[in-house]
Image (cartoon, rainbow, N blue to C red):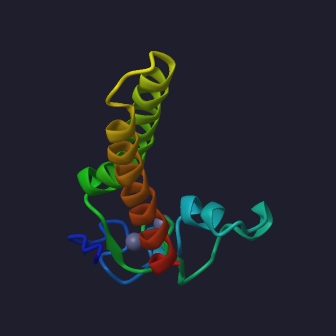
Amino acid sequence: MEVVSNLYDCKHCAGSGTCANGKDLESCLACAKRNELPFWRQRGQFGLMCGSCGGIGKAEPLTERMNKRIAPLLAIFLIIFLLAIVALAAFLNNKHFSELLAFGSAIIGSVSGYYFSSRHNRS
Ligand SMILES: [Zn+2]
Ligand SMILES: [Zn+2]
């Protein structure tokens, strides 16, 4: 599975990936801080990596960034929810316990497999 995001040109650096928002096209102080420069070197720097986009010149729309953050949370909640159902069925000695266990473990396996593999591919 591929993770595709709609990128747009970073507003801060106009797609160049380097910051020129200070006076005389210097890099701005915010980006100097993001580059972890000591404070006495934060002024008068040119061509620093853009702190908004991390130097790639493209930025993700906010909604997509939120989706990527919310999806793993939903997956965690889903897993907890399924585990609770399976545990409850085991506790109540439900006659559908084996079906629930198979159903739950299949979903948990595919969800955790998906996140593990997508993280593995991205790094
Ligand atoms: Zn940028
Ligand atoms: Zn900047």
For the view shown, which residue lies furthest in the top direction? 92
Image quadrant in which you'd find residue 34: bottom right
Q: Residue at x 53, y 84 (%)?
A: 47
Q: Residue at x 45, y 15 (%)?
A: 92
Q: Give coordinates of residue 66: x percent, y percent.
A: 33, 48
Q: Residue at x 29, y 73 (%)?
A: 3
Residue 8 or 36: which is nearer the viewer?
Answer: 8
> With respect to residue 103, does 111 lie above or below?
below
Q: Give coordinates of residue 120: x percent, y percent.
A: 51, 75
Describe residue 32's horizontal placement relative to residue 12 as left or right: right
For the view shown, which residue lies furthest in the front direction? 95
- Camera sees residue 114: yes
How many numbered circles does the render carry?
A: 0
Image quadrant in which you'd find residue 59: bottom left
Residue 115 or 105: which is nearer the viewer?
Answer: 105
Residue 65 or 45: which is nearer the viewer?
Answer: 65
Describe residue 80's horizontal placement relative to residue 107 as left or right: right
Q: Give coordinates of residue 117: x percent, y percent.
A: 45, 72
Describe residue 16's horizontal placement relative to residue 33 as left or right: left
| Quarter of the figure with the N terminus | bottom left
Which quarter is ligand 1 in?
Answer: bottom left
- Camera sees residue 52: no
> With respect to residue 64, does 49 lie above or below?
below
Q: Residue at x 31, y 79 (%)?
A: 15
